Amino acid sequence: MVRALEVCNLSYRYPDGTQALKHVNLSVKEGKKTAILGPNGSGKSTLFYHLNGIILPQKGKIIVKGREITKKNVYYVRTTVGLVFQDPDDQLFAPTVWDDLAFGPNNLGLSGDEVAARVEGVLSMLGIEEFRDRNPDNLSGGEKKKVAIAGVLAMNPEILVFDEPTSGLDPKSTSEMIELMDELASDGRTVIISTHNVDIASSWADYIYILRKGEIYAEGEPESVFSKDDLLKKTNLTAPVVVRTHREFEAHNIYKKQDKVPLTILDLVENLNGSKKQKRGMIRVIQIPGMKDGGVSAVDLDELKSVLEITPDKTGAMGTSAKECAKRLGIVCDFERDVVDTSISEAMRGIDVLIFASGGMADIVVERARKKGIRCGNAAFEASKHLAKRNGDVVN
């Protein structure tokens, strides 16, 4: 698989003598979700400042899409790697949201019409059109985060780097942020986050690196990383809540010792149910064009209504354009957070569910449902405004 980004033997020492990074090596696969996990002070932010050229390597090198970062190609790097700061106040500075989003495209030398198109595009993409003329200082923390992300997306980067993306957010905003990162990844972008939150890293990432005192201490897929209690102890990290609960259930003989460590509540429920058989419901997915395909602006709502003869027990929506479509159709969703696991959990209890899903997020639902043995039909709503039933996406 193509490497989107590589860090090779990177070391960095601050002017006061603090050794922030020491011989760091990591490789990020294109299109994958990668988490850099570590406690505060482990060097995560310093590493991320290197990834788009804010800090240049003192020793070692950073390779982006096959090109090493140097003083001569920092412009290329910053249009390829978009960095979202931990504190949006460090990123937002213009008097209005529109001006802030236009700053990057203007510096690319684009025409006025092209700049306006990009700004309006990201406003629509993230569903924040009403922020257009507002002063960023008057937005909430979660709203500022969205505007900061929009400013990065206006540069159209292939790789997105989020420094502690859920820091300071309430549970609802945290869930929305995780879903947004999933949506961006499902549209084909490479997404990298730093976090000290083991629950987020374990359930979100495809691959994890643990950073400890400026060094890569361990790496692996989430199940491998979080099955090693001694590793977590040595890196001052705790096991995710689901894993700790699993350990207690095993210790108290609530269920037999399992071969795999559960990473989600749904996995835990499956362990509890064991081989218990019960009637299962069906999940039907309506795929709405994702961000890169025009989002809600590419949807013919009248044509979309033609598939809504379905009368599900419950309805959910995941992704910006999907939620907006449901809203415009007057559909009140039963759930808009943790949609995949919630819908599968409902189906496991015999409930029929209809999900509106943006872009590639529809494929995520189908894949996860297939793994859990849930019947899942996927009706794809194409960006060309043509509605078609996709064969081969039905889980038996």
Image (cartoon, rainbow, N blue to C red):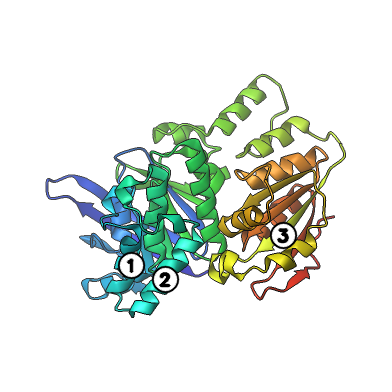
**In the shown orientation, is residue 369 left or right of residue 159?**
right
Where is residue 275, by image quadrant? top right
Q: Nearer the viewer, residue 94 or 214?
A: 94
Residue 147 image position (x, y, % from top left) = 39, 55
Confirm whether residue 393 shows in the render.
Answer: no
Three-letter code, disc 1: Ala
Say whether marks 2 and 1 touch (CB < 8 Å): yes
Q: Residue furthest bottom?
A: 111
Q: Which mark is residue 102?
A: 1
Confirm whether residue 315 shows in the render.
Answer: yes
Mark 2, residue position: 118
Label 1 Cα neighbours within 10 Å, binned few <14 / some 14-19 / many ≥20: many
**In the shown orientation, is residue 103 left or right of residue 349?**
left
**In the shown orientation, is residue 190 left or right of residue 63?**
right
Q: Residue at x 49, y 58 (%)?
A: 126
**Quick one: SS at disc 2?**
helix
**In the shown orientation, is residue 253 left or right of residue 154?**
right
Question: Is residue 92 positioned above or below 301 on the image?
Answer: above
Three-letter code, disc 2: Arg
Residue 32 image position (x, y, % from top left) = 52, 60
**Quick one: SS at disc 1?**
helix
